[in-house]
Amino acid sequence: MSNPSNPSNPLSSSGVALTHQHVVPPLQQDEIDLLSLLLVLFKAKWVILGAVLVCALAGFAVKTLLPQKWTSYAELIPAQARELAAMNSELNQLALLDIKVNASPGWLIERFVQTYESQIVRREYIAQTDYYKTLAAALSDPLARERLLSSLAQKAFTLKNSQLDQATESKEYTYYRLGVSARSSQEAHALLQGYIDFVAARVVDDLRYNIKNQLDQTLAREKARYQLTLQNLRNDQQVKIRRLDYSLAVAQAAGISKPLYGNGATFKDDDDFPISLGTNGLRQKLDIEKSQTDLTELNAGLKNSQQYIGRLSQVHLSDLKIQPFKYLMLPSIPVQKEAPKGALIVLLSAMAGLLLSCGAVLMRHAITGQRTAA
């Protein structure tokens, strides 16, 4: 019988291991030894590092080959009192003529922003620029020129509201940051300045159209009212002349040549054909009525209406000067190019190299292990 106290026996009578070393259980088939994988990657560190470096250099080369651009920026705020002084002076004169239009700073800057972001306006502006004509000259295909025009209209112009865009600098007031990108610094500056002027002219045209539309409607209404009043007065005059003719005939038939009233005498005249003036008085009154060819001479309402129409007709909107915004920053001349997210391209390329190299090393290790086991 064996001795349970034999030092060569690793187990005691209770079945507890007598050794101080822990026994490491063997790995199951579906378990992954992360430590061995990390060791494999560490042994191939120079391969991985080389792959990362090569991919990063490739990303840098791609970044360099991508088209770089120059971007000109400008910042605008709603027009202030100084910019609106000349316009308000003209609008006050129009207000005296009951011509009132909405030309507040808010309306002007809102209209400017709407027009600036209009694809139709952008395409119209770009098509007439030398910048587009130079680029389009190298394209023989009309479809290619159309794609170029659409690309410039959609991508070359930017507009950001400081209150809505977190990328802009935060300030206590609202401002608009405008940008235009082109292939050179001077072209970017010229495109932005030209487009701002183009859009501002459109806003001015819109405001002048609103004023002219209201002016034309008011003028047409006043002319129609004037003609209607004048025709009514002419009708009244014709009726009055006809009544005087009848009254004169009645007075002549009655043999009344002088006025019947006077010296305290009373006389009840006829309401339809009064004859109390007598033939002399009726004839004189009839001559006066017939001589009135210009009815405005004895009618203050017609005089005022005629004067109002004359002042409306003398309004010249070409003299109206409008500045729809105020520059916070004039269109800048770029001093350096804007690379298209170069750091991000290099970083993503390096990460791609890291992942691909690690995958390749682990795949090679797995294939080698399979062959060894076989």
Image (cartoon, rainbow, N blue to C red):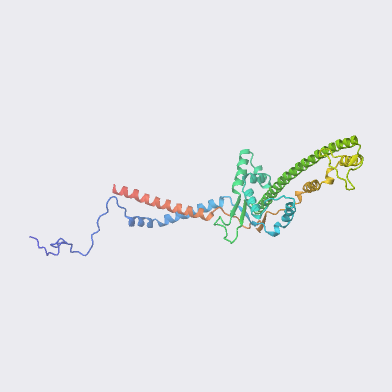
- Residue at the front extreme, as displayed: 265
- Does residue 297 appear to the left or right of 366 in the view shown? right
Q: In front here: 321 or 337?
A: 321
Classify the position of the N terminus by image quarter.
bottom left
Which residue is located at x 42 percent, y 57 percent? Answer: 46
- Does residue 274 appear to the left or right of 8 in the view shown? right
Q: In front here: 317 or 241?
A: 241
- Residue at the left extreme, as displayed: 1
Asked whether residue 355 appears in the rendered view, the answer is yes
Which residue is located at x 60 percent, y 52 percent? Answer: 159
- Does residue 323 appear to the left or right of 164 in the view shown? right
- Does residue 302 appear to the left or right of 364 in the view shown? right
Residue 121 placement (x, y as % from top left): 65, 45
Count of numbered circles in the view:
0
Residue 157 placement (x, y as % from top left): 61, 50
Asked whether residue 54 appears in the rendered view, the answer is no
Q: In front here: 262 or 160?
A: 262
Q: In front here: 335 or 51?
A: 335
Looking at the image, is 362 positioned above or below residue 245?
A: below
Q: Quadrant of residue 175?
A: bottom right
Residue 192 placement (x, y as % from top left): 65, 52
